Amino acid sequence: MTQMANMDEQADEPVDLRAIRAAYDYAWVLGKPEGRRVLQEILLQTRYNLPLPAHDPYEMYMAEGMRRVGLGIEAAICSINPAYLETMRQDWDREPSDLDAHAQG
């Protein structure tokens, strides 16, 4: 009887469908070389791995906002499967001609 009560309690908990959908979407995108390249380009555009400029507060705020987007994407990748981030880094280290040859393959 207690097992049924536990199942009823779990059924009453709200399911975050948006988080589930996002996890599937990230996994789908990261499972393909083309998706990883697009995501890498987005991360490069956010400049999330560069130091913040300290001389101009407005520029620093703008850079911090861009950086937060990149860090959020990186956190999402790590929460789904940290191995995806390592795969992206390995792809990043390849020569562009290697990636082009693979895409044409």
Image (spheres, rainbow, N blue to C red):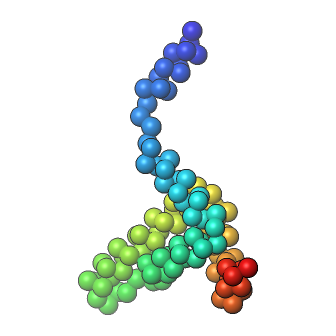
Q: Position of residue 67 (x, y in %)?
A: 42, 75
The answer to whether residue 49 shows anywhere in this view is: no
The answer to whether residue 1 shows anywhere in this view is: yes
Quadrant where the C terminus sits is: bottom right
Q: Residue at x 63, y 67 (%)?
A: 32
Q: Position of residue 89 (x, y in %)?
A: 65, 75
Say above or below: 3 vs 27. above
Quarter of the rendering containing residue 97? bottom right
Say above or below: 26 vs 56. above
Front-most of 88 and 63?
Answer: 88
Quarter of the rendering containing residue 30? bottom right
Q: Residue at x 27, y 83 (%)?
A: 57
Say above or below: 74 vs 60. above
Q: Residue at x 30, y 78 (%)?
A: 61
**Which residue lies most toward the top here?**
1
Quadrant where the N terminus sits is: top right
Is residue 45 found left or right of 40 in the rendered image? left
Q: Residue at x 38, y 76 (%)?
A: 66
Quarter of the rendering containing residue 36? bottom right
How many numbered callouts?
0
Q: Position of residue 26 (x, y in %)?
A: 54, 60
**Which residue lies most toward the left here?**
58
